[in-house]
Amino acid sequence: MTNYKVLFLDIDGTILRRDHTIEDTTKIAIKQAQDKGIEVFLATGRPLHEIHDIAETLAVDSFIGYNGAYAIYNGKTVVDEPIAGSVIDHFLGVAKQNEHEMILYTNELNLLTSKTKPIVKDFIDYFALKDYQSYEGKYRDQILGITLMDVKPDEPARYDLKGEDIYFSEVNVDGLDNCYDMIRENVNKGQAIKKVLNQLDIPPEAAIAFGDGMNDKQMLQYAGESFAMANATPDLFPYAKHRTTSVEESGIYNGLKQLGIAED
């Protein structure tokens, strides 16, 4: 059996079920991996200041947040890639012209372009965001991630910017239609785990990753063993080596059992 060293886990739709709970089998599988000396990272599009409860429940203290823009290993920052201020200006302008809304994430705050739009309220409620306030220009150079809202499927292209290699990953959550995370081609979960593995001197072959959304694509491509959840966006399946059961059906447990890590 390969000597696996590190496990990267997406949160929403991978660890967390639709009702925001974690299956007991998921907790068991993660604990069994940790007991075997495997370092566990939560790898999420969420801001890191909003996942303390999940981290505490799973006894995890290493993270990749903001879709790869920021990473921490045992309390030490190993990736810190804010978005260029010129890109922020461009996005704010396009959003205003098209009556879209945005949440812009810093390392401490969730910054809103509107507090009253129903889609923004629904997003805040679903993800139980706590630290939010209206966007102000003084935060322009601290933004690590962006979510667009009220964006029709043909509209993300309006944000294209010459010289910036970006794409958009639809938020894979029932009831939150027309919401997209902005992903940078050179700043994503895959690039972040590459930097983490280099820092830890661990080869990709010793890494495992689980995910369900297109923001997990590069992460699943880079890890030696990768699993797409059965509930994943169908476009994600070609990028994973394996397909496991859904988040509601012990997906992480069954995947790790396949590798000989989780046990009955």
Image: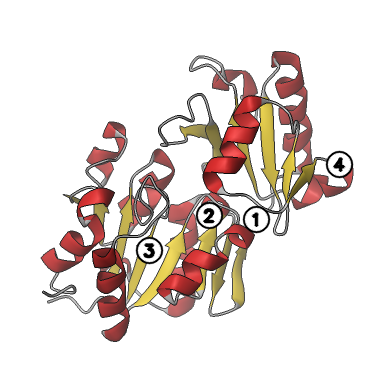
Q: x%, y% of residue 88? A: 74, 37
Q: Is residue 164 visible?
A: no
For the residue marked with disc 2, what is the amino acid?
Answer: Gly
SS type, badge 2? helix
For the residue marked with disc 1, what is the amino acid?
Answer: Glu
SS type, badge 3? strand
Q: x%, y% of residue 122? A: 58, 34
The span from disc 3 to disc 2 (Cα, nearest Å) is: 12 Å
Q: Which residue is mark 1?
A: 81
SS type, badge 4? loop
The span from disc 2 to disc 1 (Cα, nearest Å) is: 8 Å
Q: Which residue is mark 2?
A: 68
Residue 153, compared with residue 87, is above or below; it is above
Mark 2: give few (<14), some (14-19) or many (20+) Cα within 10 Å: many
Residue 47, compared with residue 74, is above or below; it is above
Q: Are marks 2 and 1 in contact (CB under 8 Å)?
A: yes
Q: Which residue is mark 4?
A: 136
30 relative position to 161: left or right: left
Q: x%, y% of residue 53? A: 53, 66
Q: Are marks 3 and 1 in contact (CB under 8 Å)?
A: no
The span from disc 3 to disc 1 (Cα, nearest Å) is: 19 Å
Quarter of the figure with the N terminus: bottom left
SS type, badge 1? loop
Quarter of the figure with the C terminus: bottom left
How many marks do you count on the picture?
Answer: 4
190 relative position to 179: left or right: left
